[in-house]
Image (cartoon, coloured by chain):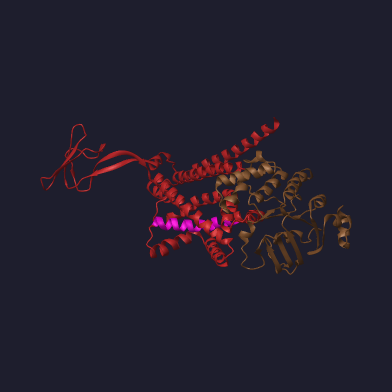
């Protein structure tokens, strides 16, 4: 039995209204349980690609199917797709007017129609998992960046998604807080969560990824298992990139 | 602490400047031929005038010795009547009075014309504020709507209302719309003020919504919240905090703008002031008192809003 493909993107293209091509014939498929890390220089379209997977970014060509939802059609039911796809942002984007617990239970109650008690229970369990069970009643502004990002991960998990998207989850953090967030992500990967991660953390990519993807100028230039990717880079531009960052 | 000493010095300077300003006003008023009669003002705030007892027909009056009872015998018939419910008799025993003459008055504490005007100002402002907030919210949402028709209509409304003077709008509402729809002066006043203030509230609401970071919308949508749920649970609660100070300013403006409804047959605080001036011939005192009463209303409002802001600020 083959593992189901959760994300299938076929030669997708994103052309901005001003004519600039953000994505060029990018194709990618992610299987259930896989951890795919996307790296590349800034402006290479990594985040854009990731954001097409839950419809935050529309595409102008190609096809995307995520967990059985056909995204490239006009009638795409984005709401039901998004219930299956969790997203973690660079800037956390926690709801500042809600407590940590309320941040986690808002969507389960309003979207999944869970009872308040059930959502509360689920939220508390997730906060234990990310190590913040004592912060239930805090407001996001009372937490450090690393704690906020862990809450944001828990918030996405509260919807029990099939796949988690991470858009540079540690880029806005002070260096000493990067570790705690990566730790939570590693744990998720170990538990078998399907993950797509855009990041500059090469150590994380090497340790956790099943595949690493290199993007430049809106194109996917190569994808390899981390060992091949880092130790024996084939593509010229990837070699230059790795030299610059390592 | 030299720092706090110099701060008090500056506060002292401010008080001194105000004192000099007040003194020059006083000197200026001395140089013109004006007699200040502050003692005339209180009766227009609190009136002691109560019900009047009037003669129901022509006849002679009889007052009892203790002055507690008043009776009347008709001039051309044998009809008689008597009164007891009064505190001051204005006629003498045996006087001939005619139908409608005031025989006695009952002293009774009650609000004077200025307080009654203040009450109307308060009522019309409060009612208009409620409608303006609802209207402003709807139009503000229209301004940021994805639907072009909603955006056009909202923009048209805001531009027309902000581009014309309130006084002209009041005349149009009172004379045109009020006549067509048979509105009372009070209803016309509420309509004019809410429509006017609503346009400004709409712009405040729009600015408040646009000030919420885009990431908040993306986070909400990524969780599967609908457009309405995103607005209701994520954007509006955050926008509320941002719009509170400008809304407070707009509400204070509304109270002040409400003085313009005095051009209709509405006895608000300003109109009451004008009426009191014409009966006392003391315009200076009356307008100072009226200004102070407006200041009282707006002051109470801004203190209330500051409290509310503090409460919102508490949640980080």
As drawn, the residue found furthest toward the left would be B78
Relative to B86, A93 lies left or right: right
Residue toward you, B39 or A31: A31
- Residue B316 visible in rendering: no
- Residue A102, percent across and down? 60, 46
- Residue B38, percent across and down? 43, 40
Q: In this view, does A97 lie above or below B141?
A: above
> In the rendered image, which quarter is residue B222 located in?
bottom right
As drawn, the residue found furthest toward the top would be B1
Magenta stretch, overall SS: helix
> In the rendered image, which quarter is residue B266 located in?
bottom left
- Residue A78, percent across and down? 63, 61
Relative to A188, B252 lies left or right: left
- Residue A238, percent across and down? 86, 60
Looking at the figure, which quarter contains the C terminus of chain B? top right
Q: In this view, does A135 lie above or below B212?
A: above
- Residue B299 visible in rendering: yes
Q: Which residue is drawn at 60% across and 41% down?
A: B314
As drawn, the residue found furthest toward the front would be A1
Q: Is residue A82 above or below residue B288?
A: below
**Is residue B190 on the magenta stretch?**
yes
Chain B tint as drawn: red
Chain colored brown:
A
Task: Give the residues in magenta.
Answer: B185-206
Residue toward you, B79 or B239: B239
> In the rendered image, which quarter is residue A8 located in?
bottom right
**Is residue B170 on the magenta stretch?**
no
């Amino acid at each position: 039995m083959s593992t189901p493909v959760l994300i299938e993107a076929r030669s997708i293209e994103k052309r901005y209204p001003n004519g600039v091509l953000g994505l060029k014939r990018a194709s990618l498929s992610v299987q259930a349980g896989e951890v795919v890390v996307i790296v590349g220089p800034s402006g290479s379209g990594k985040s854009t690609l990731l954001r097409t997977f839950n419809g935050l970014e529309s595409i102008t060509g190609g096809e995307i199917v995520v967990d059985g939802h056909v995204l490239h059609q006009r009638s795409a039911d984005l709401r039901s797709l998004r219930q299956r796809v969790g997203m973690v942002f660079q800037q956390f984007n926690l709801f500042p007017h809600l407590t940590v617990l309320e941040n986690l239970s808002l969507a389960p109650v309003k979207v999944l129609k869970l009872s308040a008690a059930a959502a509360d229970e689920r939220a508390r369990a997730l906060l234990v998992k990310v190590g913040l069970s004592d912060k239930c009643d805090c407001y996001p502004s009372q937490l450090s960046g690393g704690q906020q990002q862990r809450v944001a991960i828990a918030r996405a998990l509260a919807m029990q998604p099939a796949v988690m998207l991470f858009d540079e989850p540690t880029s806005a953090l002070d260096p000493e807080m990067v570790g705690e967030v990566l730790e939570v992500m590693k744990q998720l990967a170990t538990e078998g969560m399907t993950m797509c991660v855009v990041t500059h953390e090469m150590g994380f990519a090497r340790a956790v990824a099943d595949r690493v993807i290199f993007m430049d100028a809106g194109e996917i230039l190569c994808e390899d298992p981390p060992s091949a990717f880092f130790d024996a880079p084939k593509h010229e531009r990837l070699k230059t990139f790795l030299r610059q960052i390592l | 602490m030299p720092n706090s000493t110099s701060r008090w010095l500056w506060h002292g300077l401010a008080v001194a400047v105000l004192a000099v300003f007040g003194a020059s006003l006083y000197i200026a008023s001395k140089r013109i031929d004006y007699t200040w009669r502050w003692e005339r003002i209180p009766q227009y705030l609190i009136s002691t005038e109560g019900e009047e007892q009037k003669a129901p027909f022509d006849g002679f009056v009889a007052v009892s010795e203790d002055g507690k009872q008043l009776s009347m015998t008709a001039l051309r018939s044998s009809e008689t009547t008597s009164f007891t419910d009064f505190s001051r008799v204005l006629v003498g025993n045996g006087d001939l009075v005619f139908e409608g003459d005031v025989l006695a008055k009952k002293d009774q504490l009650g609000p004077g014309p200025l307080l009654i005007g203040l009450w109307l100002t308060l009522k019309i402002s409060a009612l208009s504020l409620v409608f303006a907030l609802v209207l402003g919210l709807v139009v503000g949402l229209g301004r940021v709507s994805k639907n072009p028709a909603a955006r056009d209509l909202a923009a048209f409304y805001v531009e027309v209302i902000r581009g014309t003077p309130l006084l002209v709008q009041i005349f149009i509402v009172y004379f045109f719309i009020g006549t067509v729809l048979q509105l009372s002066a009070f209803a016309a006043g509420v309509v004019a003020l809410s429509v006017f203030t609503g346009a400004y509230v709409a712009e405040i609401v729009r600015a408040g919504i646009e000030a919420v970071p885009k990431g908040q919308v993306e986070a909400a949508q990524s969780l599967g919240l609908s457009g309405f749920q995103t607005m209701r649970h994520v954007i509006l609660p955050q926008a509320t905090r941002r719009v509170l100070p400008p809304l407070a300013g707009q509400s204070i403006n509304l109270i002040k703008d409400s003085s313009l409804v005095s051009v209709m047959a509405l006895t608000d605080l300003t109109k009451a002031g004008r009426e009191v001036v014409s009966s006392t011939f003391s315009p200076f005192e009356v307008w100072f008192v009226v200004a102070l009463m407006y200041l009282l209303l707006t002051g109470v409002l801004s203190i209330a809003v500051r409290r509310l802001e503090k409460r919102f600020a508490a949640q980080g």
